[in-house]
Image (spheres, rainbow, N blue to C red):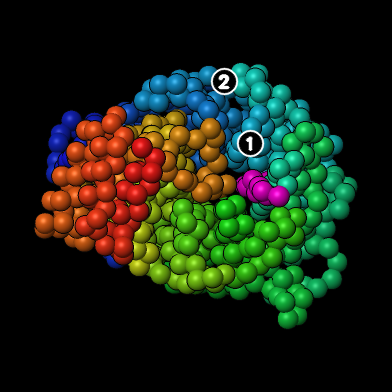
Amino acid sequence: MSRLPRRSRTTMRAAGVMVLAAALVPAAAYAADDPREDLAPGYIPWSEASSNIELLDNDPRAGAFDSDVTGFNGIGFANSDLAFSGDNAIVGSFNGFQVYDLSDPTNPTLRTSFVCPGGQGDPSVYGDLLFISVEEGRGRIDCGTQGAPGAVNPERFRGVRIFDISDIDNPVQLPGVQTCRGSHTHTIVSDPDDPANIYIYNSGTSGVRPAAELAGCENANPNNPAPVTSGNPTQWRIDVIKVPLAAPETAAIVSQPRIFTDPATGAFNGLQNTVPGTLHPSGTAYSPLPNTNTCHDVTAFPAKELVAGACQGNGILLDTEDPVNPVRLDAVADPNFSYWHSASFNNDGTKVIFTDEWGGGTSARCRATDKPEWGADALFDLDGDQMEFASYYKMPAAQTTAENCVAHNSSLVPVPGRDILVQAWYQGGLSVIDFSDTANPVEIAYFDRGPISTPANPNGLNLGGLWSTYWYNGQVYGTEIARGFDTFGLETSDMLSENELDAAREVVLDEFNAQHQEKIVWEPSFNVAGAYFDQAVRSGELSGATLDTVEKHLAKAEKLEGRGAAAKAQLSNAIRVLDDSGDQGELKQALKDLRGAL
């Protein structure tokens, strides 16, 4: 066995030079002399810096999904979030969605493009169903490109579109669900006690539609500091959509929970904690204003019937035992956070990370003058049904004023025994962090491109960067707002061993939605056991004669894998010398599981 394979590099593709990788740094401050700083501007081609992760493929936007990237002119064609189904990646866009074939995961190919404007275009999949968020006024029921002009238009669609993708090359739009504030994002919430249905938690963040266009919509002042206790205002609630799997065309809103209510006063706006005129600690106005009248995004963890909501001015935790009627368990706020944007659980559901989208994703918020706790992640431990703050994390390389950069979408890298996240930072690139110790998150890999520069706007801020970076079946895939669809290969290093990476690659899913976090279960294997072995060595809890004994017997067991009894005997010899606690205890259990599986 190779205990700790070493490989760490940084490259600059455009310059064609090799430089040393930056040292691993904690989240406390920006790193000095980081190769990501001062990368040369460009578009295609570009300059880049990387450490312990390699860009394998880039597929530029094409056809109806390509546009001028000067300034912010191209936002109507920007790539957004992504979801996965089998060998397909579904890339959302403000102009519809595209499907990439991942049969060769290192070289995806464009399979299908479906033009259907409406923004934001976030997708999720469940079996043969595809759901797409639509919030813009130009969205039409018929997916037309001519827009839907006027304050009231019967052809307008704002809400959650539903497609039948049983033939993914020919998606068929089903009746979707119209909502009063459209759909900025949505999340699948499943209920093990209700297999005939799934639920969609919808978050609308834009203006309220007139009742003449959609019955039941009632506008209110979302910045009203006074208690709001009467009427049925569209603000201060989410939409719960029930989708019968046998008849998804009948999907409909079944509840609109007021999850921000003050239990003492009954005020719908009970969590509103920031008013206009309040300044961010940077001394500038909050952008956006975190006034908590809706959620930006929520993430479900069905194994514990929990949902973590990133809700403008608050991070909240919901009990979803009854998914139609979620119950708020806890809420947290932080003056450093401008806009609570998204959430991720760890695989045990004992931690949650919230992101802050300070500047709305369109501003430079990773400058040397921006403190690490601004536009960052906030890490919390779950103590029962309460969230306890542990630390902040921000990608540790300062970016320029020409790069929109702030914390954005992420997913777990399924390494057994560790909590590892790959996260997008727009034009800050991606950062892979180990947050096993929530008080001390550590970066273990990164990738970054230089600022986007065009002939028409060579030195200004052009919208681009990685919107989402997700691990799926052995690779990291990313949606680049302006440059297309990226594939990355994570590499071994001092902080990620070959056994750990191979164990992560053994996790093969039929589908994946980052906001519907299914608990990962690893089948016993020599890679999984080796991952725990490497972790025990790395931490120093396995050393000396015990290390030599375990390594010897584990190596012999692997060679004897085809001879069950002999391999089991070697594993028993290794198990015998290990303690029951700490990293040794984790390794001991992994070896017992492996012995039982042989």
Residue occupying the point 27% across, 48% down: 572
Q: Is residue 50 left or right of residue 486?
A: left
Tell me how far mark 1 sits from mark 2, CA to CA. Answer: 18 Å
Mark 1 or 2: the one toward you? 1
Q: Which residue is mark 1?
A: 126
Amino acid beneath label 2: Thr
Q: Position of residue 73 (x, y in %)?
A: 53, 37
> Does 575 appear above or below 374?
above
Query: What's the residue at 47%, 56% (across, down)?
Result: 348
Magenta segment boundaries in residue numbering: 182-193
The foreground one among 482 and 598 is 598
Q: Is residue 468 above or below residue 145?
A: below
Residue drawn at the location 34% of the way across and 63% of the way down = 437
**In the picture, which quadrant includes the N terminus?**
top left
Instruction: Inspect this view and state whether residue 142 appears.
Output: yes
In the picture, which quadrant includes the C terminus? Answer: top left
Q: Is residue 363 visible?
A: no
Amino acid type for the residue under numbered disc 1:
Tyr
Residue 10 in the image, given as x and y percentages of width and height: 20, 40
Label 2 sits on residue: 112
Determine the secondary structure under disc 1.
Answer: strand
Looking at the rendering, which quadrant does residue 281 occupy?
bottom left
The residue lying toward the viewer, choosing from 541 and 67, is 541
Magenta-colored stretch includes residue 1? no
